[in-house]
Structure formats: C-alpha cells, structure tokens
Image: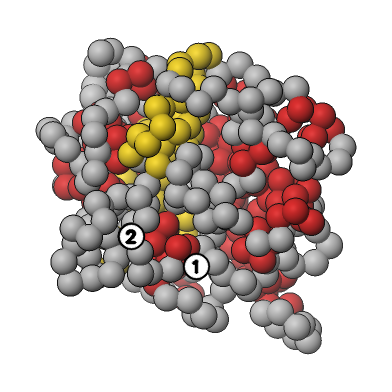
Amino acid sequence: MKSLSRRKFLRGVGGAALALPWMESVGNAAPTKSVAQRMAHFYVPIGVVRRGFFPGEADDIIPKGNLGNVMKSLGKQNPNFSVKPLDQLTPTMQPLEKFKSKVSLITGMDRTFQQGTDVHAQCASCYLSSAEPYTIKGTAWPLDRTLDHLVADHVGTTTPFRTLEFSCNSHRDNKESIYFDNISWYGTGHLAPSIRDPRKMYHRLFSTQEIDRYRDVTDLVLEDARSLSKDLGYTDRQKFAEYFESIRTIENQMDRLETMKAELAKVDFEEPTESHLPRGEYIRLMGDLMVVALQTGLTNVATFMVGPERWDTPYMFESLFDKPRSHHGMSHNQTKMIDDLLKVDRFHMEHFAYLIDRMDQVEQPDGTSLLDNTLFTYGSGLGDGSTHQYNDLPIIVAGGGKRVQSGQHINMPEGTPLANLWLTQARMMGLDMKRFADSSGTIDQLLAER
C-alpha cells in the first residue's frame, strides 16, 4: 500500500485505467508534501455585453427589468489605474458572489489587432499568444506558441498529458476554419487540436484500448477498487467512494446525451441535431472531465473553450430560450437582443462558477484545495462582440491560493497589454521569463507577495 503513488492507476481487463486522487492512506501523506501547481483557461467567445459585465459601463440603452435597475446604480467606471475591493458585482458576475474572496476582476487590458485577418478568428487563435503585430513571419496571423504550452514545458514534463484541450463545440459542420475554434497552439501554424466529444476525452483520459464490450471503466476496475478500499482509513474510504461516484456520474451523463442525440436524429429539424442538445449539461460534462484530469494529476495545464468564435450554427441554451439560438447572430443585433445576450453571458458565468466550486471541493495533500493550486482564468479575446473591439477585455482570475491577492478589482491603465497578465502568470508558474509577446511589465497587484 505505501508504495502506491498519488497517480497510481487501477487497471481492469481490456486495458482500461483509472487514476486515483490523493488520499492520506496511500503513499507519503506528510502535510509538507509538495502539491503540483496547475493552470487552466476558460475561454468565452464573442466577448460580452459590456454594460452587464464591467462596473460603470451602463449607458442610455438600459434593458428592462431588474438587471437595468442594478446597472443604473453602478455609476461610471474609473478610467484611471485603480485597485479596490471587489465588493458589488455586476449582473453578469453575480454568480461569483459566493467566491468573491477567491477571484479578482482585471479590467483595462488590450490586445492589438493585426490588419488582414478575420477579427473573430484572430481574437481566438491569438488570445494566449498575444504576439506583437507583424512580428511573426510567413503568416497573416500574429500567432506564436501559446502560454499553456510554454507553461507545460515547465510543469507538464512528469504528467501523462503535458496539456489537455477541451472544446464545447458539439457541431460537425466545419463551416469555419480552425482559427475560430482553437485557442491552444504548439506554434505558428501548428494546432494543438481540442477534443469536442466527451466520450473521446473520457477514453483518452482513462482507457488504453477501445473495447466496446468493456465500455465502463468503473466496472473494469471496481474489483481492484474494493480490494484497495479495505486498507483505507474512514475519511479516505469516503473520498474514494465520492471519487468513483463522480466518475460514474460522468459516464451516466455521457450515456444520457448520446441517447438523446440518437433520438433527436430521428426528428426532422431545420437545424443540426446538435443544436437541440442541452447546452449547459454538455458544458458541465466537459468541465467535470477537466476537473478530474487536474485532480488526478493526468495534466497540470488545460484550456477550456466554452464555444467557438463567429459560429452561426445555433445552440439550445436550456432554461433561457425555447429554441436554439445563434450567439454570434445575437451579438450583431445587440440593441434589440440585449436582454437575451445578458442571459447568455450570465449562463457562461454560471458554468465558470460551477467549475470554481468543483475545484474548491477537491482536497490536496497539504490540506489546500485544487482551486488553491490552480490559476483558473476566465476571459475573451473581444471586449464586445458587436463592435469587435480589442480593448478592455473581460478577465477574471480565480484560485491561486496564497500566491494570489484575490478579492480585488484591478483596473489597469489604458493600453495595458493582455500579455502583462500572461507574463505574470508564467512567472507565478515558475518560469524565469523576462518578457512575453508584447508585454510591458507584470501585474504586481495580483501577487500576494511583491
């Protein structure tokens, strides 16, 4: 028992494998044991409705109802550099109320647009590289090796997967190029392809062979698991049971969505079948897979794209609308659809909050949480999808534990490059980096010790 490591795999017939979470009874459980530092990015496409997200940006076009009344009371945002407590949350950010002390809002950061390529494609593909315009030779894109891979070069050398790329684009129409649907790149012209299908991601994480007759990993390893659990303490037995239940829940969610998709395929829709799948359930399923991968040490670096840029194919935002809607289409009719867009922005924020909560509940060997040891960033490559502006990008940094000064609203001076945040995070992840892309410095106010 004591020879087992935290990443020990339980294996069943057929080559299926399941990684164990950390448990006191397994391996060296001293409180001083070092905990891996992780980084994850939650990317939101098409920007946000600024007047719902940013403090002080409500204008004369106020939506009806309570949201408008709240935004009226926020006043105008200070255009100068300032740091203050993150007290009153805007309507879009209200799902983070429970986690105000564990997140920081960072406003005022910009990216420079390189003329000659599509706005949406560039804002997605270049989001994590932020290369200076016209510095990358032989391409129309200011796209370099992205932050996640630079960090993985340092913290991903001992994990089974250096990085993992998740995408919540369920459509297969391929109407757009790869630049609209990926934020992770090994380098210019070299895509790190994301996985869209939950079943494919599940098999990538937990299976060494594709054997249909032994489809459920938990069934394959259950006997070994029962044997192992007999030697665990009470607390670890509880944790072990919770972990296996979470894996079983993921399997059941996949089965449910696959069954629903098969049934929908029998119906004659104007839109693709995928348009009618429950959007939130799909996002949460992919998010649960990401959390499990980080929890068990399968990877220390992940990117999570909640949707593609400029994709006109509709989605079913369950609980919001009674039929599938195009996020991109709504963004270009913001005056008439402001209320609906605010609902979509909040819908995405609720799922970011869901993943924060999931990470916060996972205990690490030193008593901290998975969230405490993960820099988890919400962001978009556009400040506003209707105007295509690259300035004042919506950015929230969650987690980071004692490394991060949380609970703040940091409003950076006008013109601050987004790369300043990426440089700051790279250094927090242990990289000895003097400069990143077009950075002009670091965001010291985000650091707990400076």
Q: Residues within 10 Å of mark 2 (few under 14, many from 20)?
A: some
Q: State the SS at label 2.
A: loop
Where, by quadrant of the figure, is residue 1 drawn? top left
Residue 278 visible to an observer of this rendering: no
In this orientation, which residue lies closer to the viewer: 236 or 344? 344
Residue on which the image places disc 2: 114
Tag 1: amino acid? Asp
Tell me: residue 51, above or below residue 153. above
In percent of the image, x 16 and y 66: which residue is there?
137
Q: SS for tag 1?
A: loop
Q: Is residue 12 left or right of residue 337?
A: left
First reached walking from the N terminus: tag 2 or tag 1: 2
Residue located at (55% from left, 18% from top): 86
| Percent position of residue 79, x then y | 50, 26
Q: Is residue 198 left or right of residue 294?
A: right
Is 240 on the left-hand or right-hand side of 254? left
Q: Work out how far the residue at label 2 is from the one at label 1, CA to CA, in angstroms.
A: 32 Å
Residue at the (21%, 42%) spot, across then down: 436
Q: Whole-percent x and y of residue 126? A: 34, 56
Residue 340 screen position, x and y as percent? 76, 52
Nearer to us of marks 2 and 1 is 2
Q: Nearer the viewer, residue 283 or 83?
A: 83
Q: Mark 1, residues whose alpha carbon is within 10 Å: few (<14), some, or many (≥20)?
A: some
Q: Is residue 317 left or right of residue 421?
A: right
Kind of residue sitting beneath label 2:
Gln
* The quadrant where residue 376 appears: top left
In the image as oriented, which residue stretches furthest toward the right? 65
- Of the numbered discs in the image, which one, if any, rests on residue 79? none
